[in-house]
Each structure stands twice: as structure tokens, then as C-alpha cells.
Amino acid sequence: MPKKKAAPIQSVKGMHDVLPEEQLIWDFIIKKGRSILEDYGFLKIDSPILEQTNLFERSIGEGTDVVDKEMFNLKTKGGDNLTLRPEFTASFVRAYIEHGMSAWPHPVKLYGIGPVFRYGQPQGGRLRQFNQLNSEIFGDETPAADAEQIFILCKLLNEIGIKNTYVKINSIGDKSCRSGYIKALKDYYRPRLKKVCPTCKTRFKKNIMRMLDCGEEGCRAVSESAPQALDYLDIECKNHFKLLLEFLDEAGVPYILDHRLARGLDYYTRTVFEIWSEDEQINFALAGGGRYDYLVELLGGYKTSACGWAMGIERIILAMKALEVKIPESKHNPKVFLAQLGDLAKKKSLVLFEELRKSGIPIQASFGRDSIKSQLRIANKLGAFFTLILGQREALDGNVILRDMESSAQELIRLEDVVEEIRKRLKDK
């Protein structure tokens, strides 16, 4: 009786493979991000995927969707409570404090790239494991820092190919003026609680500002007439926001004021923003961020102003595909293919392949194949200009056949002349 075939194992729900054909667009986005951020003086940092659970409970805040519903928590054999990071900012703040960055020249500008984890229903551009590009500035309380972060983000999206963007922006004040606004919100929502969703009824008690940006239709209708944070700002917060908008005007960054924008994390103060596209086929925020002037102190450091943003890479890829953004061809596309026949030829081919690679000539080979027809088919599929054919006789005589893939013309050249000959011919392509 034949053995029953084992059931295949699938990837975990909400977590995906990035296949080779998708890597080109990933590399393009990441290289652009690194290039722009490093030009503006940002330094790369990699933080652990696992952190202490209380890092996120203290920073993001209990009562937020992230902490209450979306964190992947685990308990180690030693009894430690750990969490797969749901965002970068708290980890960066922890690293800033732990490694004594308060003694560095300020502002300290950091960026990071990597996966984050949130338990939720997978949807377009937001999986349970998704990837973010993150940027933070520590030690600059001026609105110039907010403007720099927004400007960099808009420029990055533009250079990636998402050009028609604008900023939704708001100021939610700080500790000195927030209490008056919270009271006004409670007074407004209390007689209207029957009209909001069950989640917002809970938010009314725990995190009332989250009611403002709830996506439920009934909640959005109620929030339309809710009190605006801008009306409750003290003079310092007003001046900060006014100057920020003047910076954006000067830089030519389009924006709209959105009084319902609060973002979903407790640590934000004053500026909050999101980047959106004017193109109708993109109906989600491309990136977002804001200022968090109390978070470093909250997590055990000295009082330090800070601001930052995060951009989900999967969402950016969705937007690029919707806009049919063309990605530049990889510079590593092979110009030359090395075909071999027989054991001796394969042995010599390894040495020849390395000589060509070290000389900067984009080359590929299929060392495991013996059929010259199948190897030429691969060379054609890869778009190689030339194929070098090394058989047993050529290997013994110290020669190689140079085949022009366009004309199919072939000629014999000496092995020691291959690098120079290929360089010369590639100049004409």
C-alpha cells in the first residue's frame, strides 16, 4: 500500500514570503530610504524583535488597540514576559536611554528597517508581520524638526514614484493644555454614546481621543462635529503649530488640517500627521508619525523632545503597483552567461566565473547543467548579451567560445583574453 503523502505546511496566517521576483521593488524602496535619510544625517540602528512587554504597555498605553488587542505576547521558560515589537519608536527610546545617547551631540537622528508584528485581521498592506522604515529625531523641540521629518518623508515617497501626496496634520497639544480638551470631548460624547460603536464606548472610558479617528460610519458622523484640539491649545502649542505650518508652506509641502487626526498611540504630543495620496485608487495612509516629548522621560530617561515617523513597506508596494510605478532594472542583470560541458570544463569555469565577477562584469552560470541547449535557453531568458561556452576541448586548449546572443555569431578566444575582450564588447551594447 503506497505511503500517504504528508500534508504540506503553510506559512502562518498573516505572515508572508517575499519571493525573488519581489525583491527588486523591496531593494529599490530600502535603498532610496537609506540614501535620503543618511544624506540628512540619520544613523542606522537595529533593535531586537523581542522586547519586554512592559516597554510597550508603558509607552503605547493601556486602552489602545495595539496593547489591548494586537500584541504578540509570550512567556519564557524563565518567566519573562516578552512581546514581538508592534512598532519601532518605543524600542528606539529604550536604546537611546540604555546606551547613553543623551550624552551624544544633539539632535540624535536614527532610522531603522525591519519587521513588526500586530495581531489583527490580515488585509491589503497590513499583515500580522509587516515591515517598516522608521525615522526618529531626539533632542530637538523646535517645529523645524517636525518639518524636516515631514519634508524627508514626502521627498522619499516622491523619489520612489508616489508623487501626488499631501499631509493630513493636526496638533493635539501637550500636558499643559490637553486636560481641557479631554474634558470638552467627554462632555460632547457623553450624551451621544448610543450612536457610537461598542469599541468606542470602551474608548470613552480609557482613551477618548481614539474615538475621533474610528472608521465606523456612525462614529465618523458623530466625530464630525466634535470639539477641535486646535481650539484648546495654549500659546506655546499654538506658536509651535503655526511655525510648523509656515515651514511646510515655505518648503512647498501641501497639507490639510484634520481635526479628527489623533493617531493610535498614547505617547503623541502636539504634532500628529499622515501622508496620503491624491490618486483615488489609493485609499489608505502611506505613512504617519508625530511628536512625543514625554516618552523618553516616561521610560526612565532625561526629559527629551523627540519626533518621528513610520512607513509600512507593504503598503508602499501596494501603492506603487496601483500607480504602475516603473522600477529601474537591476544593475546586477547578467550581461554574460557562462556555459560549460564536461567535468574539466566545469572545474575551469569556476575559476573563470570568479575572474569575470571580480572584474565587475555581471555574469551568471548554471554549473549543474550539461545540455548546451538548456544553458543557451537560460542565457536568452536572462537577456545576456554574450555566452561563453567552455567544453572539454576548449578547457584542454586554453580557449573559450564567445557567442553573440543577438547574431548567434561565435568565435574562439584565449582564456587569458576573455576579461578584456568582454569589457571591450560590452561598451558597444
Image (spheres, rainbow, N blue to C red):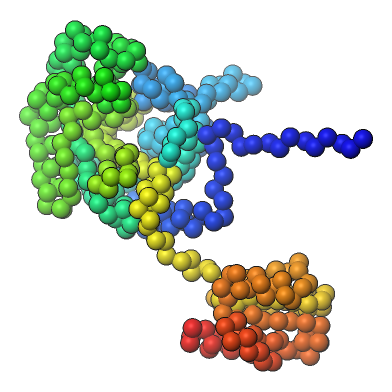
Q: What residue appears at the point 59 percent right and 87 percent down from the top-left corner?
A: 407
Q: Which quarter of the figure is the N terminus placed in?
A: top right
425 relative to 152 in the view: left or right? right
Q: Quadrant of residue 132?
A: top left
Q: What residue appears at the point 16 percent right and 10 percent down from the top-left corner?
A: 187
Q: Position of residue 186 (x, y in %)?
A: 19, 12
Q: Position of residue 104 (x, y in %)?
A: 33, 44
Q: Position of residue 280 (x, y in %)?
A: 28, 45
**321 up-or-down from 167: above or below:** below
Foreground residue among 31 and 175: 31
Outermost residue toward the front? Answer: 1
Q: What residue appears at the point 45 percent right and 55 percent down from the top-left corner?
A: 25
**313 up-or-down from 391: above or below:** above
Q: Position of residue 238 (x, y in %)?
A: 9, 32
184 relative to 407 in the view: left or right? left
**260 up-or-down from 158: above or below:** above
Q: Quadrant of residue 423?
A: bottom right
